[in-house]
Image (tube, rainbow, N blue to C red):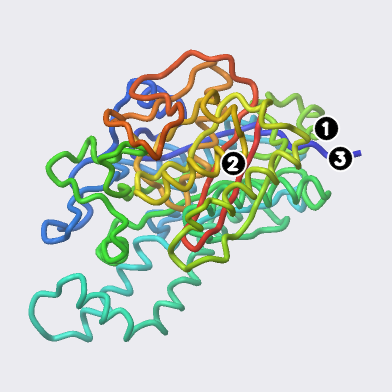
Amino acid sequence: MRRRIVITGMGTVNPLGHDVESTWRALLECRSGISKTELFDASTYPTTFSAQVKGYDLSKDLGAEHKHPTAGRNCQFALGAARQAWRHAGLEGNTSLDRTRLGIYLGSGEGSLDFWNLTNCMVDAWDGDHLDTVQWAKLAVQYMDLHREVEQESNMTVAHLAAEFEARGPSFNVLTACAASTQALGEASEQIRHGDADVVVSGGAHSMIHPYGVTGFNRLTALSTRNDEVETASRPFDLTRDGFVLGEGASVLILEEYEHAMARGATIHAEIIGYGASADAFRITDQDPEGDGAATSMRAALSDAGLEPKDIDYVSAHGTGTKQNDQVETRAIKAVFGERAKQVPVSSVKSMLGHLIAAAGATELITCILAIRDQVLPPTTNLHTPDPDCDLDYVPNEPRKANVKTVMSNSFGFGGQNNTLIIR
């Protein structure tokens, strides 16, 4: 008999809120988490704004005597979100949980602390005048050996969480760019399904709002440069969109085997019923322009769930606000849903949250669970000028009451990594 995977806890720290309910209220009120960048002096960069987490105090979630004084910014967000989810799942104080059956699976990116260390090394080796983004990029190439060492630190978040919860089961981290936390949740559900764990702490964390991160995305021309209209700069599916807005944060969910959750009397918030994954095999930074890989991921999730496109009530889009991504995702949805594509509502909360990179998918899955709970769809804000190439129902500019039971959530990463989850 196939083991079922349910979600019993949720937590988040993001630009709109430091917990689940405040975040949800902000989304339904169409608030923006985007402002001028304060984490470093970005005044000379092509993009001077971002979606930052402001005023977060880890001790509010872990207590003043917590054991993670050296945790970097992304690790702090993950620890806070995970402890919220742990409490929400009713696991606080649980002494009967078999910790060898408790796993960790994150989509966690390198944190700002890692990159500050790298940047400081680069600056120490340079003795000249002001560096523009091209010069920064060239200097970075000279330090790729160090960069590879820094990238290994992305596993630090898993190590912090394993220590926090005494998790002695399987622990993994995946960094597939913007698809990372959706992939982590999907692979974590597979661990439970295959009997390798009973409970998995899963989600994502990332903090790239620093000179190195912004330089890289500016060089890719992926970021919006709407410096005079920062709060409305994230415009998924709108004709005037000019790139995504870089964000940061963490979201964590407690995944649990259904019978295990029932036996301890847990509240079940949703069930993961389908997971799909694919690769475009196209280019390192571009999606397949026809959307074949994205469509493959969605079809795989539907097949895993034993569903047809007609069974999906709402699609939580990747919806970054770049010219290419939004067109490709629209094409892929049309390919999968056929004639029904224009009837199924689709929206992108990145219009308010910004793009949390490795944390994006997990954060968006939480909004899907809340959409089912409250029977309301979060909107795509800043959508005022229709794009003829993006002609679906994107729930523009205000939340919408809806009969929603089954939801599809998409995440598509640089390099053509595609992941889809279906919950009910």
Q: Secondary structure at mark 1?
A: helix
How far across and down, in percent of the image, does residue 73 sit?
A: 37, 54
Q: Give the quarter of the figure containing the N terminus.
A: top right
Q: Quadrant of residue 410?
A: top right
Name the residue type under label 2.
Ala
Q: Secondary structure at mark 2?
A: helix
- Drawn side of residue 150 relative to residue 384, left or right: right
- Which of discs 2 and 1 lies nearer the camera? The answer is 2
- Left or right: residue 345 compared with residue 193: left
Sequence-first tag of 1 and 3: 3
**Disc 2 target residue:** 335
Q: Measuring 39% from the left and 58% from the top, which residue is drawn there?
A: 72
Q: Nearer the viewer, residue 88 or 291?
A: 291
Mark 3 to mark 2 CA distance (whole Å): 30 Å
Task: Specify whether residue 65 is in view.
Answer: no
Q: Position of residue 136 (x, y in %)?
A: 23, 75
In the rendered image, is residue 279 in sight?
Answer: yes
Report which residue position mark 1 lands on.
259
In contact (CB < 8 Å): disc 2 and disc 1: no
